[in-house]
Image (cartoon, rainbow, N blue to C red):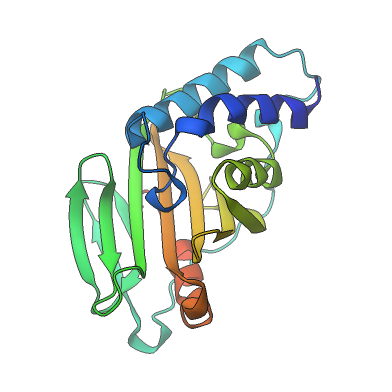
Amino acid sequence: MKNAVLISALFHELFLASAWSPSLLPNSNALSRRQAFEQVLTTSSAVVATSTLAAPIASAAVADETPRVTTRMGGLLEPFQDGPRSIRMMAPSGWNKFDGEVGAFDLKWQDLVDPTENIKITSSPVKSTTESVALLGPVQDVGLSLASKRGAKLIKAEERQTDGIVFYKFDFAIDDGTHQLLQLCVSKGKLWSVDANAKEKRWGKREELYNNVLGSFMPKLA
């Protein structure tokens, strides 16, 4: 079975009811965000373990290290660190910050004027044997699968490695007029998702800031 066919079958089973991001999800979602995350990584591990592929999906690796983004953008961003969650990043200055909504997000930043402009961080436990988001397959295939199940157009799919962690980043144009960046990674037994959203007409004003926020996210303090 070819990689693309395996990934297509995997995502058909998993993502019709999963919740990578509220913006990509129908309101009638049957699974909680945490249940979906666990199902995705658990099933991915099982598929790879039993597959007869000559080159396992998880074998892909990013060779070059990309430095973590630390720019303040002239004061638009400020350093943020959460000790209990063991994360650090550059966060929007002056935005409303919300801490934890069960089943929705761990942390959220929201623009003071337009609540549709927001950044959310979510996490879910995964098996200790799950060490990288690369287990899900090639980044482009993952992005296309996510887009096709969520009424979105995949603009770009990128992967990078920073401080030994592989990150998948996707740029989506969603049918409801939302533009979204979505980033996934696995670290210390958790699957982390960071999504940044804005209306399409406002995307040009937020794109650089959002890319810097995602590029600064690190799910460990040192």
Image location of residue 138, percent across then percent down = 69, 40
Q: Return the residue nearer the eye: 132 or 18.
A: 18
Residue most toward the bottom?
A: 74
Q: Determine the residue positioned at 32% across, 53% down.
A: 87
Which image quadrant is residue 51 in? top right
Q: Position of residue 218 (x, y in %)?
A: 41, 54
Residue ID at (26%, 80%): 113
Question: Could you tell me if residue 208 is visible in this image?
Answer: no
Nearest the eye: 163 or 194:
194
In the rendered image, is residue 140 in sight?
A: yes
Front residue of 117/90: it is 117
- Residue 112 place in picture, x, y as percent: 23, 77
Where's residue 206, x and y in %? 46, 77
Q: In this view, does 222 lie to the left or right of 1?
A: left
Apparent side of residue 22 relative to residue 151 in the rendered image (left or right): left
Q: In this view, does 211 lie above or below 174?
A: below
Residue at 76% in and 32% down:
4
Whether 168 is drawn above or below 135: the answer is: below
Q: From the image, which quarter does the N terminus lie in?
A: top right
For the point 34% across and 56% down, which residue is it?
A: 120
